[in-house]
Image (cartoon, rainbow, N blue to C red):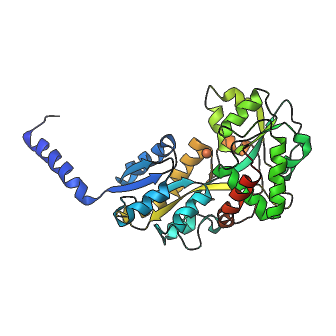
Amino acid sequence: MIFTRSTIYIAALASFVAPAIAKDVNVYSYRQPELVKPLFDAFTAETDIKVNVQFLKKGLVEKLVAEGNRSPADVILTVDISRLNSVVEAGVTQPVASNVLNANIPSEFRDPDNQWFAITSRARIVYASKERVKNGEVTTYEDFADPKWKGRICTRSGTNAYNLALTSAVIANHGETAAKNWLEGVKGNLARKPQGNDRAQVKAIYAGECDISIGNTYYMAKMLSNPDQVAWANSVRIVFPKFENGGTHMNVSGIAMTKSAPNKQNALKLMEWLSGDEAQKIYAEANGEYPINPKLSASKLVVSWGEFTPDDTPLIEIAKLRPASLKLTEIVAFDE
Ligand code: FE
């Protein structure tokens, strides 16, 4: 093409005008860049709305509270129902009334007051050594406290969000006293002090340090696609434990709109888009999570791990039990 003075002038004018149209949406994310980038790139390609993301490791609630009405954030993105609920409880979100969100997300996966919306789910399951654990040897969460597992269990810190949510589910199913006994029983069966992330436990099984570990489902997909970790993945199989009188514990990742969202319309578009077909497919295929939208199915790999019945403890109850599970975890000195 021939560059004339007028094309250059038009290009400069366009970039000057762009900010006034406010084709932006600002996201604070606890989720990692490699996961959210393909999602936001697809959203921008479709809507022309640019997504600016600030990635945080901690302090999201404190940051939003400190920024108050001047916060540039429109949408928050996080894993774990307790973290999602803590943003709501801090009073820095606003309700979102959307027929699209209501149609795409089953009611048990969104706040009755429309403050938070789950966008994916994951099960907290057992990774079991193919060599040293027989089929049917572990079937329930209650099982983890059985002395037959002495010196055979690996897990990350008991105060990690995923483990606290699991302990909350134990409390919901059995009450605090039984949950304390359960934590003590599991602690007594650990092969080593809690350390590392969910994948590090599978590595320890591969290395022969323990026979079962507790972890989230999608980490299997991540290990299988990582040349350095595929051997760990292949040393274990997935078992979906259930509660004796319940189902398999699941947690979620989710979204909320900030109270002060400066780009409210774009924020709504992004939230609705994340619950729709294209985003849900990316979550399922690229991250090995369960789509929240019932129109979509999990990836072939994830489906191959088997079916299970989710525990029916309401997510909000899991979130509300967090202080109790943290207290019990500290009382039994789970990590020491
Ligand atoms: Fe994770």
Residue 123, horizontal then vertical, whole percent: 70, 50
Name the quadrant where ligand 1 sits.
top right
Residue 124, horizontal then vertical, whole percent: 72, 49
Q: Is residue 12 left or right of residue 90?
A: left
Q: Is residue 52 left or right of residue 108?
A: left
Q: Residue at the location (49% across, 53% down)?
A: 59
Q: Quadrant of the C terminus?
A: top right
Residue 122, horizontal then vertical, whole percent: 66, 51
Q: Is residue 212 left or right of residue 292?
A: right
Observer able to see residue 220 = no
Can you name the residue that lies furthest to the left here? Answer: 5
Residue 249, horizontal then vertical, whole percent: 74, 55
Q: Residue at the location (71% across, 31% down)?
A: 203
Q: Count all numbered tags in the image, as a single digit.
A: 0
Residue 112 higher or lower than 118, as above or below: below
In the figure, residue 169 lies in which quadrant? bottom right
In the figure, residue 149 lies in which quadrant? top right
Observer able to see residue 208 = yes
Q: Quadrant of the N terminus?
A: top left
